Structure formats: structure tokens, C-alpha cells
């Protein structure tokens, strides 16, 4: 049986505040989805899912 371990990564507060200030200036609201690391147990396979930021239905991807 394959076990997938998912660990969520938090975005830095300074980056989050910068995005919120820029979006407040432009009168928009960002949707921030934290990234995660997925590990397959008993292997050396890892998948890093980046942070996703959605502004006006446009997705921006931010790696760690």
C-alpha cells in the first residue's frame, strides 16, 4: 500500500502583507492558497506544490 504524507507549507508573513497592500491599492482581493510537500512513504519521491495566488481570476504561482 502506498502512503502519501502531505505537509502544508506556510507563506511568509512579509510576502503576504506585501500582496495585501498591493491589492488594497488596486481595489482587488487576493485568494491565497498555501503550498504543500507530498512525500511517498518508503521512497525518495517528493512533490512540492507551490503557493497559489489568485487575483481577478488570474493565477500566479510562487515557489517556496
Image (cartoon, rainbow, N blue to C red):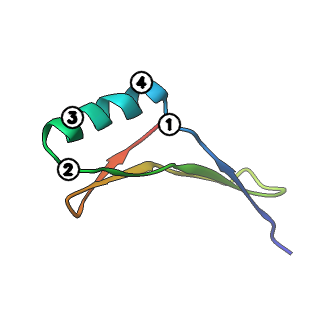
Q: CA distance from mark 3 to mark 4?
A: 12 Å
Q: CA distance from mark 4 to mark 2?
A: 19 Å
Please tell me which of labels 3 and 4 falls first in the chain. 4
Image point 31% across, 37% down: which residue? 20
Q: Which residue is label 4 attached to?
A: 14
Please tell me which of labels 4 and 2 falls first in the chain. 4
Q: CA distance from mark 1 to mark 4?
A: 9 Å
Please tell me which of labels 3 and 1 falls first in the chain. 1
For marks 4 and 2, give the one nearer the viewer.
2
Q: Which mark is residue 28?
A: 2
**Residue 12 rendering spot, x and y as whole percentages:** 49, 29
Q: CA distance from mark 3 to mark 1?
A: 17 Å
For marks 2 and 1, give the one nearer the viewer.
2
Q: Which residue is label 3 attached to?
A: 22
Please tell me which of labels 2 and 1 falls first in the chain. 1
Instruction: Return the residue nearer the eye: 36 or 3.
Output: 36
Determine which quarter of the picture holds residue 24: top left
- What secondary structure is found at the residue carrying circle 2? loop
**Residue 18 rendering spot, x and y as whole percentages:** 31, 29
Q: CA distance from mark 2 to mark 3?
A: 9 Å
Please tell me which of labels 2 and 3 falls first in the chain. 3
- What secondary structure is found at the residue carrying circle 4? helix
Classify the position of the N terminus by image quarter: bottom right
Crowding near the residue tagged with mark 3, few <14, some 14–19, many ≥20 C-alpha atoms within 10 Å: few
Q: Is residue 4 left or right of residue 42?
A: left
Residues under numbered marks 2 and 1 in contact, where contact means CB atoms less than 8 Å apart: no
Q: Which residue is label 1 attached to?
A: 11
Question: Is 18 rendered above or below residue 8?
Answer: above
View extreme (top): residue: 14
Instruction: Return the residue nearer the eye: 45 or 35.
Output: 35
Amino acid at each position: 500500500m502506498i502512503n502519501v504524507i502531505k505537509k502544508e507549507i506556510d507563506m511568509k508573513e512579509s510576502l503576504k502583507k506585501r500582496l495585501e497592500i498591493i491589492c488594497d491599492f488596486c481595489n482587488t482581493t487576493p485568494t491565497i492558497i498555501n503550498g504543500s510537500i507530498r512525500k511517498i512513504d518508503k521512497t525518495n519521491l517528493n512533490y512540492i506544490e507551490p503557493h497559489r495566488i489568485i487575483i481577478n481570476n488570474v493565477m500566479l504561482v510562487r515557489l517556496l
